[in-house]
Amino acid sequence: LVETVACALVLSAAGILLFAIRESRRFVFSSPSQSAVPFAFSVQMDGFIVPESTRLSALPSSSPDNGDPEVIVRKLGPNETDIAARIQYESFHEPPKNPLEAVMDVVSAQSMREQIKNGLLQRTKRDDWICLVLERNGVPVACAEAILKGGKQRYLFNVGVLPEARKCGYGRQIIEAIEIECPEDFVTADVWQDDENAKAFWGAMGYALQRTFPAGPGFGPFQRTAGHYCKDLKKATK
């Protein structure tokens, strides 16, 4: 009995450690190139089935039979925070890599969804908050946020594109739309330095690296490095 209890405690501790390590490397940055996939899986583990999870509120996909899809970018309405929350959750969620992570995902999913939604609700109270959503054939598939930072710069963050809508230029389109909405001369964004696709994307958008800094939860080898990128909108329009 003692050995059984000890084994259970060791497995529990290992599970908590694995979950903590995984969560310490998750930090929402403006990285539309992330390779996240929809939160849906079904895992068989020692006779126990983790049921397939569905999206917070599934967004229908649109595939027009004829012609190009109709794409519009608009401001998020005052009662539409659920739309942005859905897009951000689907965009930034990292799929589980093994059965243990799958179980942990089921436990943490609701908490993550609530954190995203609560953060959005808090930011709606700010006078300097901008949130745009991109729709394809009437279906929201991308969003981006921006707030005033330091009084002179607009900070761009939470740029998210649904996995099924990537590689269509929607990330670029919504960022360009945010830039038009910004009355400030400078727009900044933080980008993971170990994400080569993200660095290339923001560089192609005209953003230059200003500095690097340790960011996100975690410590030691689990501490990631971010780059602070800036774009001079005056120069970009010349």
Image (spheres, rainbow, N blue to C red):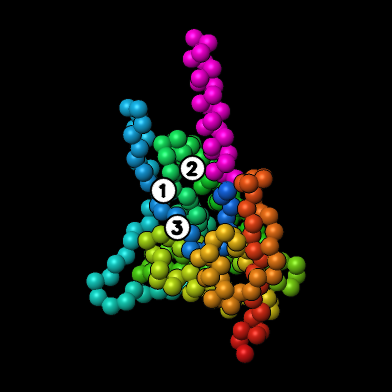
Residue mark closest to the camera, 3 vs 2 = 3
Q: Residue at x 50, y 65 (%)?
A: 197
**In the image as oriented, which residue stretches furthest toward the top?**
1
Q: Is residue 179 magenta?
A: no
Residue at 59% across, 77% down: 206
Answer with the quarter of the image where residue 137 lies: bottom left
Q: Position of residue 188 (x, y in %)?
A: 65, 69
Magenta stretch in the rendered image: 1-24
Which residue is label 2 attached to? 109
The 10 Å Cα crowd at callout 1, few under 14, some 14 to 19, many 20 or more, is many
Identify residue type, mark 2: Ala
* Image quarter hosting the C terminus: bottom right
Name the residue at the bottom extreme. 238
Q: Which mark is residue 35?
A: 3
State the CA–CA distance, disc 1 to disc 3. Answer: 12 Å
The local secondary structure at tag 1 comes to: loop
First in residue order: circle 3 vs circle 2 = 3
Is 41 left, or right, of 29 in this rendering?
Answer: left
The residue that label 1 is drawn on is 39
Q: Main secondary structure of the magenta part?
A: helix
Eyeballing the image, is 57 above or below 101?
below
Give the image location of residue 34, x and y in percent. 48, 59
Query: Whole-percent x and y of residue 59?
Result: 38, 57
Of labels 2 and 1, earlier in sequence is 1
Residues marked 2 and 1 touching at CB (< 8 Å): yes
Which element carries disc 2, helix, strand or loop?
helix
